[in-house]
Image (tube, grey):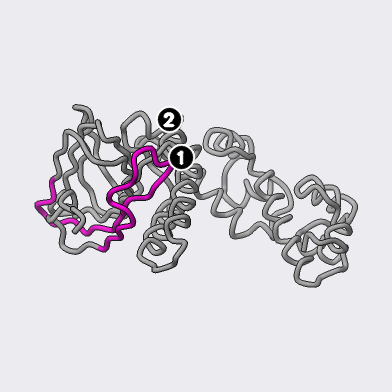
Amino acid sequence: MQNTSFISKHVISGEYFFLNLTPPAGARGVVVCGGLENCAPDYHIIRSSFKYHSLEYVVKGEGELAINEKKYPLHAGAMFGYSPTTRHAITTDPKKLLVKYFVDFVGPRFTQLLETHPLAQHKPYYFSNHVGHLFETLHRNGRDKSPQIHKICACLLELLILQTADAALLMKDAESPAHQSFQQIRAAIEQEFLSFSKLSDIASYCHVDASYACRLFKRYSKESPYEMLVRLKMRHAADLLNNGHTLIKDVAATVGFQDPYHFSRSFKAEYGVSPKAFIHSDYR
């Protein structure tokens, strides 16, 4: 029977998956196990070493992470990692119990990606809800019985590491008024992109100055608010074209472009082909 003594018994409930607790030496990349834990009030783990590399993500609750002699508060949205030689301790607030995902793994396929990841600094970083969805997807697939489960989970873990590499925030930044404003503007663009035509529309809707919105996106995003707006419009346009809407001028009008030529230029800039070429090709 495989040894699972490293799994904490101080949980109210836990859901786990075990793929390979004895990965071969020199393995390129193996997801060992993972789980979702509802921590008990006395949950407290202290380790000076560990068998595997690990990533953990806090779904809700509060607690504390002590890692390499430094202590950090934990709140929902926090993600942190540790290696086999990282001293660490994890404690829940007994009044605000931690609920958290974890995944354990070995191999340079993952560890090399983490070398340049913010988590290599051994402190918790904060992320938006999409990280929780990535962990949930990994967890759900890990508990499946697919014959390809090892490969699927390895791909999902690699995706998780890559998608979090550029989105990490320290707690003081994640909770700052500036970041909250950024999140509000970003959410408004996602929900109302068909109603907006230009940057001033976004700024007016969100009751902020346009230049301030641009500064926020420069700080927290890889694209400007207008670039995000156009990207969402073009994605919706591609969906319409793919679903049989072949009149380009009608699609252009639907996504807020009164000039079909301007629309075609924007579409080609986004996807590398014109809307006409998209319709009459195998891209669909």
Query: At which x and y percent is residue 244?
Result: 80, 72
The residue drawn where x is 24% and y is 35% is 72
Name the quadrant containing residue 49.
top left
Q: Quarter of the image containing the N terminus?
A: bottom left
Mark 2 → mark 1, Cα distance in angstroms: 11 Å
Q: Residue at x 19, y 55 (%)?
A: 97
Q: Which residue sits furthest bottom? A: 244
For label 1, the crowd category at 10 Å Cα-Cα, with few meaning under 14, some 14 to 19 and many 20 or more, is some
Query: Label 2 belongs to which residue?
Result: 115
Residue 160 coordinates in the image, percent (x, y): 46, 48
Q: What residue type is labelled 2?
A: Glu
Where does the image place residue 114, in percent across and percent down from the top left? 42, 35
Dot label at residue 109 = 1
Q: In which quarter of the image is the C terminus?
A: bottom right
Which residue is at a point 26% across and 63% down the rendered structure image? 15
One can see residue 78 in this view? no
- Which quadrant of the structure image shows residue 74? top left
Q: Does the magenta stretch include residue 186?
A: no
Residue type marked 1:
Arg
Seen from the viewer's position, the closer of residues 119 and 33 is 33
Q: Is residue 236 left or right of residue 269?
A: left
Check residue 55 in the rendering and tell me which mark sits there, or answer none.
none
Tell me the magenta residue range.
Answer: 15-44
Where residue 103 appears, as percent x and y from the top left, is 33, 50
